[in-house]
Image (tube, rainbow, N blue to C red):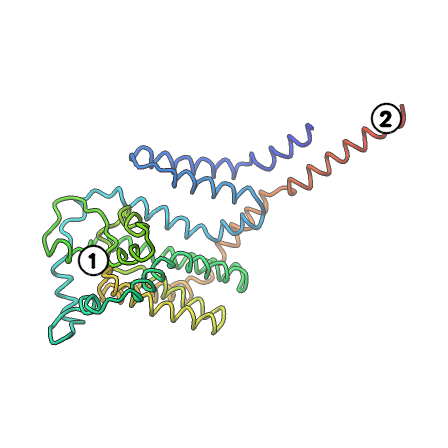
Amino acid sequence: MQRVTELIQERFFTPIVSILISVLAAFCLFHYRMGALTWNHLFFSLVILVLFLAHRQSRQFLLLASPLILKDALYDSLRYVPFDWLTPIHIGDLYQLEQSLFGITCEGTPMLIHECLALKSHPFLDAVCGFSYHLLNPVVFLIFVILWRSRGEEMTGRYAVAFLVMNLMAFATYLLYPAAAPWYVTQYGFTQPVGPVMGHAAGLIQFDHLVGSDFSARLYSLNPVVFGAVPSMHAGFTMLGSLYAFRIGRPFGYCTAFYTLFMWYSALYLQHHYLIDIVWGVGYALITYALIEMWLKAPVSRVFQRLSLFLQDEETSPLPAAVYSTVNNDDESQVSKESLS
């Protein structure tokens, strides 16, 4: 029994586990002190800890996914940026820029693309656009997993780092160029907000009506960055994903590319983005891909290799096998004693 206790201590009370627990505790404490700690933060922390402790492969998966996890944590923390730091919001100037670059004539009237699409709404489009829009994060995760299983850890790590770098560029843009989405103009016109505004699901409301739920409305009401229309990360995520999907294989790449194009259409149809937002997001994806794959490919790979080796050095023998071995040895010793007596 003493040996089992020692094995548990070696497994679960290592310096790296202590560091991880401290980081997760600090993460939850930060949100608590900011007055916005939720069960989601606690569950998020628990999942990370369980994955780290569960198995060698789950630890390796967690290491590769750490840039994606960091992105989510940073994005959620943007809700604490004081509203005064974001004023003035770019509303009319962005609308006019979109009009000058991508203005069209629809049904004999000059208008923007998303305004024309709003005139041609249909329940079928509401359904498929809404469904594809909500699939964004699952698709990002799917590409990550398929890369990991088919192309190895180095490329998966580069994809994850590229994803993080692209988002960091977007976060900086949100703070330096806070911009209102098309739905804001529809709701409030070109009036500057006098305080924080709750996020709005816009065209996704029709999707909610079709499925008999308020999922989209509740989800977007919790949006930590309401004035983050530029750039469109729905466009950026899918563009970056497509670039790496073609590294997996052409069939998967073409399927992802089709989803990417439809995502761009959905962003316009659902009144969430202007076309310039989409172009901006695609540009960030292309820049990031070139940066990681052309100039930082070797450094990123070396960082993940060193972290992987560090985790391996911290590992001990798998707990279950060790425990069973110890129990069996104790049983054998007990049997030997009984036979001698």
Q: Tag 2: residue type?
A: Glu
Give the residue drawn at x 34%, y 67%: 286
From the image, which quarter does the C terminus lie in?
A: top right
Element under disc 1:
loop
Is residue 56 at least partly visible in the picture? Answer: yes
Answer with left or right where residue 55 lies relative to residue 171. Answer: right
The 10 Å Cα crowd at callout 1, few under 14, some 14 to 19, many 20 or more, is many
Cα–Cα span, label 1 and label 2: 79 Å
Element under disc 2:
helix
From the image, which quarter does the N terminus lie in?
A: top right
Classify 27 as above or below 339: below
Answer with left or right where residue 176 lies relative to residue 11. Answer: left
Answer with left or right where residue 143 lies relative to residue 114. Answer: right
Q: Label 1 belongs to which residue?
A: 181
x and y, in percent, of residue 209 in the image: 29, 55
Q: Tag 1: residue type?
A: Ala
Q: Label 2 belongs to which residue?
A: 338
x and y, in percent, of residue 294 in the image: 41, 67
Is residue 283 at least partly visible in the picture? Answer: no
Q: Earlier in the sequence, mark 1 or mark 2?
A: 1
Q: Which of the 4 quarters of the picture holds residue 243?
A: bottom left
Classify 336 as above or below 61: above
